[in-house]
């Protein structure tokens, strides 16, 4: 895990909104754009940052792309931050 990529991805409010929507479950890119009232181009930009940080999974089915959270990377980030604070889990 590249902590820099994760923290950069989490720093943006729009990407945090994407993650919160994905918390509800797997969703297609079109439905995600509509739910967040984003243009497909803007959503694509944010999704690429989230994919680079491994915070989301992408699956393809026919002509559709679906996205879902990768919670293991979030767990690793939490552990890293907790260790930085001097705590243990």
Image: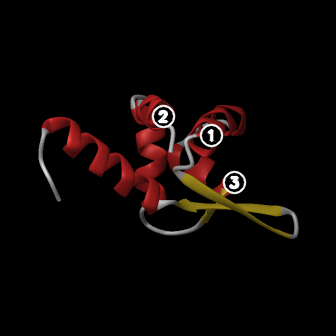
Toward the right, the furthest residue is: 62
Badge 1, how many Cα within 10 Å: few under 14, some, many 20+? Answer: some
Residue 20 x %, y %: 40, 53
Q: Eyeballing the image, is 75 above or below 18?
A: below
* Lateral position of residue 65 relative to residue 82, left or right: right
* Lateral position of residue 67 relative to residue 9, left or right: right
* Lateral position of residue 41 relative to residue 83, left or right: right
Residue 73 x %, y %: 45, 54
Q: Give the alpha-carbon distance from disc 2 to disc 3, as whole Å.
A: 21 Å
Q: In the rendered structure, which disc, 2 or 3, sits on the residue that comes first in sequence? A: 2
Q: Give the alpha-carbon distance from disc 3 to disc 1, as whole Å.
A: 20 Å
- Residue at horizontal 28 percent and vertical 51 percent from the top: 79
- Disc assigned to residue 52: 1
- The residue identified by callout 3 is 30
Quarter placement of the C terminus: bottom left
- Dot 1: element: helix
């Amino acid at each position: 895990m590249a902590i820099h990529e994760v923290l950069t991805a989490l720093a943006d409010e729009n990407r945090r909104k994407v993650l919160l929507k994905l918390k509800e479950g797997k969703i297609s890119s079109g439905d995600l754009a509509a739910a967040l009232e984003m243009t497909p181009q803007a959503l694509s930009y944010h999704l690429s940052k989230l994919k680079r940080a491994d915070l989301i999974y992408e699956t393809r089915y026919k002509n559709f792309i679906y996205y879902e959270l990768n919670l293991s990377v979030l767990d690793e980030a939490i552990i890293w931050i907790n260790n930085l604070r001097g705590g243990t889990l």
